[in-house]
Image (spheres, coloured by chain):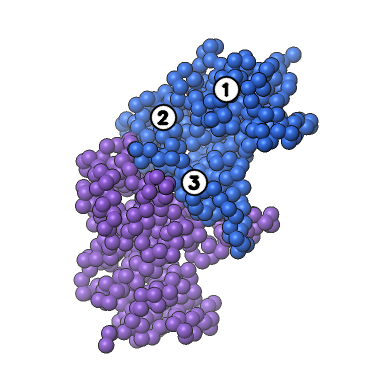
Chain colours: A purple, B blue
Amino acid sequence: MRESFSVAIVGATGAVGGEFLRLFEQRKFPIRSLTLLASERSVGKELTFAGSSIKIQEAKPGAFAGVDVAFFSAGAARSKALVPDALAAGALVVDNSSAFRMDPTVPLIVPEVNPNTYTDANRLFAVGNCTAILLCTAINSLRSLGKMKRLIVSTYQSASGGGASMMRQLEDETRAIVNNATLPPTSLNQTYGFNLFSHNTAIGESGYNEEELKVIEETKKILGEPDLKINVTCVRVPILRAHTETVTIEFDGPAPSVEAAREVLLKAPGVTLVDDREANRFPTPLEASGKDEVLVGRIRQDLSNPNALCLMLSGDQLLKGAALNAVQIAELVLGI
Amino acid sequence: MRESFSVAIVGATGAVGGEFLRLFEQRKFPIRSLTLLASERSVGKELTFAGSSIKIQEAKPGAFAGVDVAFFSAGAARSKALVPDALAAGALVVDNSSAFRMDPTVPLIVPEVNPNTYTDANRLFAVGNCTAILLCTAINSLRSLGKMKRLIVSTYQSASGGGASMMRQLEDETRAIVNNATLPPTSLNQTYGFNLFSHNTAIGESGYNEEELKVIEETKKILGEPDLKINVTCVRVPILRAHTETVTIEFDGPAPSVEAAREVLLKAPGVTLVDDREANRFPTPLEASGKDEVLVGRIRQDLSNPNALCLMLSGDQLLKGAALNAVQIAELVLGI
């Protein structure tokens, strides 16, 4: 009989939490018992999993007794507070927050990219920033065609990156606008419906916002390329759940041909090539929504630099950008 | 008494046509008589200008008798067919289409950038592609700080670039989605509401679409920099009327400081600096909508290249990207 596990989700009521439940069923993750944890205000609510109703319990010290695997997706502060407790209780921890990603002792794994960057001693695993995961998954295979020197990335990030509340905000504002109604209150400093804005994270001395710095540092760690240069501008667009990125890859020598890149991407794990010039069909966030794979296309030589190749990608922020990658890590480490 | 002109608009019922009417009133363009021309199916409709109702007439040969200035905004095919007639009738022609932009004998003017690139012999003037106009207006002043070698641009283009019908399509689809109704029919090959897609123009051998090739060629012509290298990816986003662009500028030497760039941009004609890191306030298409100026901000050193500077811009596609630039050209040439 296959081994089965006592699993906990911290942040069960969030947008990523809901995806965990769907993925466990879809991938037949071997669960013996499931504990759903969230903040105090959700305690007593119920969620359905595999036909049974499960009561939400409070995420607090002591909640991890007997848990084999704990998936955290409740923000960096909660992870910092509770991950040590889960580890002390003996759980394997897969943390979707930014709390431990850049800790050199914590593996930051995208299973299609760097599955061998951990040892049996590792009990805590970090899931990268969604934009970085999608980027690494999309471009990893192209490294077989030449050494990458520099990436130039612009993002078109969806509301889901800001959680279920930001998705609701976008929908509510948009509904108000198209129905000529009064805009609902917002915690953003501007209207989101039919608008876009520079990513709403704090900006430091360098002029880069926190999201951009995460993409830069985490991409280098995931790819194992500390010297890779990365230029990224993160922008939030009025899209619900999948991120899009335009990417220019500068190689350390002439860029591979478009044909060679297509051939490699066709076989790349976690990638679907969507690159039909005649039909003008390329990755879109709507097509990427709900899909496990990252869509990659618009592959072309950079007319401004013979060493560079351009492409665009779309990937589901809640799946490959978060919950799916976390479940894949657990499957990898547990040998499922 | 100030000289006044007999003015015609070809494409009066379109999204840009409506902006011409507003701009003529707002800028007190000296109009003696106004002729509104459109395709046959609009003949007989009426539009209001300066309190009077004006009947739409058919845009056809012979329609330009007595016209001093003709503004064309009805697509390249109609411009190719009728501009010769308007010129033969003695009109000064300002053409918003792509028909004549790259003709070396036709000036392609952004008044803030290259106002001196015509002679008295020129009677036909082209208005550039909206993305190129906004880009040139935004970056022109920075050329005083160093020679630009290469631009890397990703666009976030609004529905208005596809005309009034694409704006309606976006609104109708979005209304259907948020109200859980059936999607209206579309001429696009995919859903636009809450989606984005690679610019819907034909793609040639190079893998670049027509919009991208326009941006590349026209930007070089407007800036008078035939050797400037340009990398651009054009993307349509679910925004109504203003375009946004992320821009990396590579200089032929160390990039100017952020402070120097800000100082120059503060004084740049046609530009409003929106660059507040602390308040996380930068250019957005919603703020740019209805404004004459191009908003510029997010100015920072490129962490991946010491010779490069990054910024983003938002500008009203229908105003500075089209109708306003056309009216400015007429004002420049007529000495208004």
Q: Chain of mark 1?
A: B
The image position of residue B163, as x and y in percent, is 58, 40
Q: Chain of mark 3?
A: B
Which of marks 1 and 2 precedes in the sequence? 1
Task: From this view, report whether residue A215 is shown above or below residue B29.
Answer: below
Q: Chain of mark 2?
A: B
**Residue found at x 35% / y 69%:** A326
Task: From this view, report whether residue B181 is shown above or below residue A90.
Answer: above
Which of marks 1 and 3 precedes in the sequence? 1
Q: Are marks 2 and 1 in contact (CB under 8 Å)?
A: no
Q: Nearer the viewer, residue B265 or A197?
A: A197
The image position of residue B244, as x and y in percent, is 50, 42
Q: Amino acid at mark 3?
A: Arg
Q: Amino acid at mark 2?
A: Glu
The image position of residue A7, as x and y in percent, is 37, 81
Q: Which mark is residue B83?
A: 1
Foreground disc of the pair 2, 1: 1
Distance between the Cα atoms at labels 2 and 3?
A: 20 Å
The image position of residue A193, as x and y in percent, is 58, 54
**Is disc 1 on the same chain as disc 2?**
yes
Residue B199 located left or right of residue A269: right
Residue neighbourhood size for the residue with mark 3, other residues' Cα within 10 Å, grouped as few (<14), some (14–19), many (≥20) = many
Of helix, strand and loop, which one carries label 1? helix
Task: From this view, report whether residue B84 is shown above or below residue A322.
Answer: above
Residue neighbourhood size for the residue with mark 2, other residues' Cα within 10 Å, grouped as few (<14), some (14–19), many (≥20) = some
**Residue found at x 39% / y 80%:** A8
Q: Which mark is residue B217?
A: 2
